[in-house]
Amino acid sequence: EHQLTLDKLPAFIAVLRISALAATSMETLYRVPFLVLECPNLKLKKPPWLHVALAMIVYALVVVSYFLVTGGIIYDVIVEPPSVGSMNDEHGHQSPVAFLAYRVNEQYIMQGLASSFLFTMGGLGFIFLDRSNAPNIPKLSRFLLLFVGFICVLLSFFMARVFMRMKLPGYLMG
């Protein structure tokens, strides 16, 4: 389908020459510090108590850190917002509010955690969809992974839109 013909050969060679020239100049640039500095000859050994972590432990740590970072843990530590707010209703009674409306750059802790849960659920939905393409998976398992993956992704997407409308009423209303 995509064969290199003789009429395209000079352009192809020109591209190769330019990329080789760029690679040569980058290699020259990378060599400059080593003209002055010398790498030490170290014989490092792995400590005997250090073991390679299991893949699922690393995966769990990545998912938990993703949950915390998308939830705004850094913002929560620096600003120290309240977990929930309160709003007076028409009778003067206070009711709890989880979303800080009309303020894009501020949030309550519960708002960050709820949004983070949705982002993580959407990401896990994509992982389920990816796992459904494994070669030797039974048909029922494939169907369940596809179903759960689509539900997670769609629910996460539409609930994030609902959360944005709670945060900014009238957002994306046209």
Image (spheres, rainbow, N blue to C red):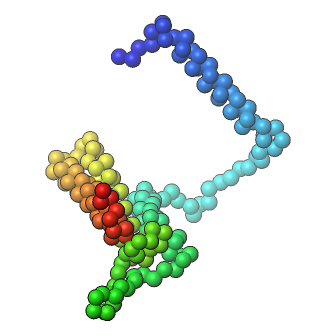
Residue furthest to the top in view is 6
The residue located at (41%, 62%) in the rendering is 63
Q: Is residue 39 above or below residue 10?
A: below
**Residue drawn at x 41%, y 14% as measured from the top left:** 3
- Quarter placement of the C terminus: bottom left
Which percent across, then down, holds residue 140? 15, 51
Count the numbered circles shown: 0
Q: Is residue 121 visible?
A: no
Q: Residue at x 48, y 7 (%)?
A: 7
- Judged from this view, the residue extending furthest toward the right is 36
Horizontal side of residue 55 vs 19, given as left or right: left
In the rendered image, the quadrant that contains the N terminus is top left
Question: Residue 157: where, in percent of width, then height?
Answer: 30, 58
Answer with left or right where residue 174 lies relative to residue 143: right
**Quadrant in which residue 29 is drawn:** top right
Of all residues shown, which one is farthest toward the bottom? Answer: 92
The picture quadrant where one finds residue 167 is bottom left
Q: Quadrant of residue 66?
A: bottom left
Name the residue: 73% across, 49% down: 42
Q: Nearer the viewer, residue 35 or 4?
A: 4
Question: Please, is residue 129 above or below residue 48 in the view?
Answer: above
Q: How far from the left and from the top, in percent, is residue 14?
A: 59, 16
x and y percentages locating residue 70 in the rendered image: 44, 64
**Left or right of residue 69: residue 17:** right
Decide if residue 84 is in sight here.
Answer: yes
